[in-house]
Amino acid sequence: MFASSSTLPPLPSSETEEENDPHYPLGLTPAERQWSDLYPYVARRGYHLRSRYRPGWIGSWIQEGLSTSELMLRPTWRYEYEDAVPSPGRLTVIDATRINDGSPVALKLISMSAQINTPDSNEIEILQYLSSSALAQDSRNHCIQMIDGFEVFTPAEMKELNAQGFSNAFIAVFPFARKWTDIPFRLVWEGLDFVRQVLEGLAFLHEHNIAHRDIRSENLMMDAASQCFSATYPCDRIDTPVRYLFIDLGSSTRFDEHRLVEFRHGWHKEIPEIYDIDSEGNRVPTRLYDPFKGDVFVLGMVLDVYFGKVVLLSSSFC
């Protein structure tokens, strides 16, 4: 789920300019600036980003008369001032609030040019297909549903945004989800239900000729709409069943016919059969491979990391 670097606005012209910002070093990162620039366009489509990203944002601590250096001397500043905490990384996915009902959602910025330049993968098309009414109602479909999506810019807006360094972009809107590891597994049944659901979801993808091609722990989530997450203390999964979801179809391919593919990136790098030895004796991932079998292999790796050793340790006490 990544947008190309061409969607990022230009960096500050100098370190001095950045250090003159009263928010420094808690000012907007380059990745955050793209969302700040997009704030009015997203709001027109019915979504609000956090206050940190509003145009003309002034930190709440500064409004209260605190300098940033004074703020950072407080041990609990991260908890007192939510808008002071920068979001790390490339930030192609961000949380937001749907204006009409206050529901939390996630927005993903997808570069349209990246879709064109990667003919083997079309994330937007695959998301629209899997979120169509017929497939969305299938209980075996464990891909997170795109509940809204739009090209952010009208032709008039495009001229302005191109000047800011943006390429044409699409924003996909998803229900807010949480890491599948946020709540500990307490019972064997809960672990087995997780395994059943992710295997069912992968089989569903493959049945529709879609290879995920980047399955890893970070790309597995659980439905945050469950009442399990609204309680002060998390409840057991057996009391409030959880639905597990695949996310990040940025590397996925929907095939017209079964064929072998080249390795691009992601966890498929762990597949042994993709490697050959070059003239200098180095292992290089140049062999063609079956991406569907690759999905099964890397999902097995995830299950082994989180459950394999636990099962072995438990069996030693039987």
Image (cartoon, rainbow, N blue to C red):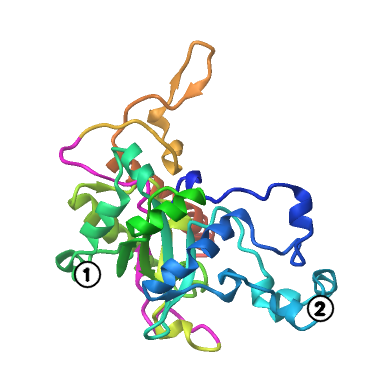
Q: Name the mark on residue 66.
A: 2
Choose between 247 and 280: the one closer to the eye. Answer: 247
What x and y, as percent, mark residue 3? 44, 49
- Say which of 38 and 188 sits in front: 38
Q: Say few, some or many: other residues with alpha carbon within 10 Å of mark 1 (under 14 / 14 to 19 / 20 or more).
A: few
Q: Which residues are magenta?
A: 233-258
Kindly report the distance in space between the C-alpha atoms of the residues bearing marks 1 and 2.
52 Å
Residue farthest top in this picture: 279
Measuring 69% from the left and 47% from the top, which residue is drawn there? 13
Mark 2 residue type: Leu
Please tell me in which quadrant of the rendered image residue 53 appears: bottom right
| Figure check: 214 above or below 67 | above
Q: Position of residue 233 (x, y in %)?
A: 55, 86
Residue at 47% across, 82% down? 229
**Residue 268: which numbered mark, if any?**
none
Query: Is 245 rendered above or below residue 296?
Result: below
Mark 1 highlights which residue? 139
Disc nearer the start of the sequence (1/2): 2
Q: Is residue 103 left or right of residue 210?
A: right
Label 1: which secondary element: loop
Helix, strand or loop for the magenta stretch, by majority: loop
Foreground label between 1 and 2:
2
Residue 19 vs residue 247: left or right?
right
Q: Is residue 77 above or below residue 278?
A: below
Give the x, y percent position of residue 37.
Answer: 52, 62
Expressed as whole percent of the image width and height from the top left, the position of residue 316 reads 53, 59
Q: Residues within 10 Å of mark 2 (few under 14, many from 20)?
A: few
